[in-house]
Amino acid sequence: MIHIATVHWRSDRWIDIQLRYLERNLDRPYRVYAWIDEELRGQAHRFFYATDVPVDRHELKLTLLGDLVSHAAEDDELIVFMDGDAFPIAPIGPYLRDKLERYPLVAVRRDENNGDPQPHPSFCVTTAGFWRRLPGDWRRGRTWTNPQGKEVTDVGGNLLGLLEDAGIEWYPMLRTNQVNPHPLQFGVYDDVVYHHGGGFRLTAGGRLWRASVEDRLNSTLRGRLAARLPRDGLGGRVRKRIDPLRRYRRTLGAELARINEQVFELIQRDDEFYRQLIDPELGGELTELRAPVLLEDAR
């Protein structure tokens, strides 16, 4: 039995897509455990287990689902953590069996997101016994130094720390796109998993965009002025209006949302859309998309 833990937030638009690709690409019986929002209760019957208990943090939902599954499953049964906008695009059973013979945990590692070193929950697989003994934890915590010399953490930080402290080697699934409409979103990993990125919220594209412009925008006159204003009250409202980093993020996010919709529409009508991302010879709509990464006229 394979136990799949996923989160669907604010929208049910990815449920049909994710379940369709799971049915197509898993060769063992499986159960899907989902954390959904209250407004998605009508979709609860689609899953083996679903809860809409209000919890704000994505990483806490995944950690709690992992605890639930790991204590209900047999030690050698698989737990698959998967973002709601992620799914296997190829038969994945042989791939997982091969990797888990040599490593206790297999997960996406998003090197492309400004060098993130931690396992990412967009797709991660281990056994129930390993997750319970570790014990697994998706929360932020363990920090690392990014290429700009700043100390950061993110979802999966604690899991990285647990693995490092125990000296456990894990297998990183890396981005294998041959076509990249965006350097972070619309990712294919080891040619077997797709992660849309930004499928449930407006995003400027991870930390990649911030690393590229943060220092430059903060050093402008507007940036220096915004930094001197309080974050709350009237001063906070003024700060939000003039902060160039916030303005840049909103503009870039709106542009990426438009591209996201184009790709989502393609996914809905073409079950083999992902081939355009891994075979440049195919051509197609995805080879023509160029999502914005930097806005040179941002002020």
Image (cartoon, rainbow, N blue to C red):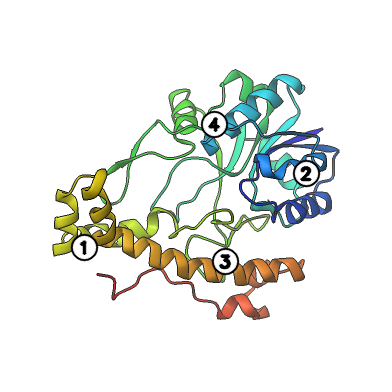
Task: Provide the residue designation for mark 3.
Answer: 260
Q: Secondary structure at mark 3?
A: helix
Q: Earlier in the sequence, mark 1 or mark 4?
A: 4
Amino acid at pointer 1: Arg
Q: Residues within 10 Å of mark 3 (few under 14, many from 20)?
A: many
Question: Between marks 1 and 2, how big is the CA–CA gap?
Answer: 47 Å
Q: Is residue 29 above or below residue 203?
A: above
Question: Between marks 3 and 2, how big is the CA–CA gap?
Answer: 25 Å
Give residue 254's position: percent from left, percent from top: 46, 67
Q: Residue at x 26, y 57 (%)?
A: 214
Q: Quadrant of residue 79?
A: top right
Left or right: 40 as drawn, with respect to 135: right
Tag 1–tag 2 contact (CB < 8 Å) = no
Question: Between marks 1 and 4, how big is the CA–CA gap?
Answer: 34 Å
Q: Residues within 10 Å of mark 1 (few under 14, many from 20)?
A: few
Amino acid at pointer 2: Gly
Task: Provide the residue designation for mark 1.
Answer: 216
Give residue 222's position: percent from left, percent from top: 18, 62
Q: Residue at x 71, y 44 (%)?
A: 40
- Mark yes or no: residue 220 visible: no
Amino acid at pointer 3: Asn
Q: Is residue 276 above or below residue 211?
A: below
Task: Provide the residue designation for mark 4.
Answer: 60
* Residue placed most toward the observer, 108 or 54: 54
* Residue placed most toward the observer, 250 or 204: 250
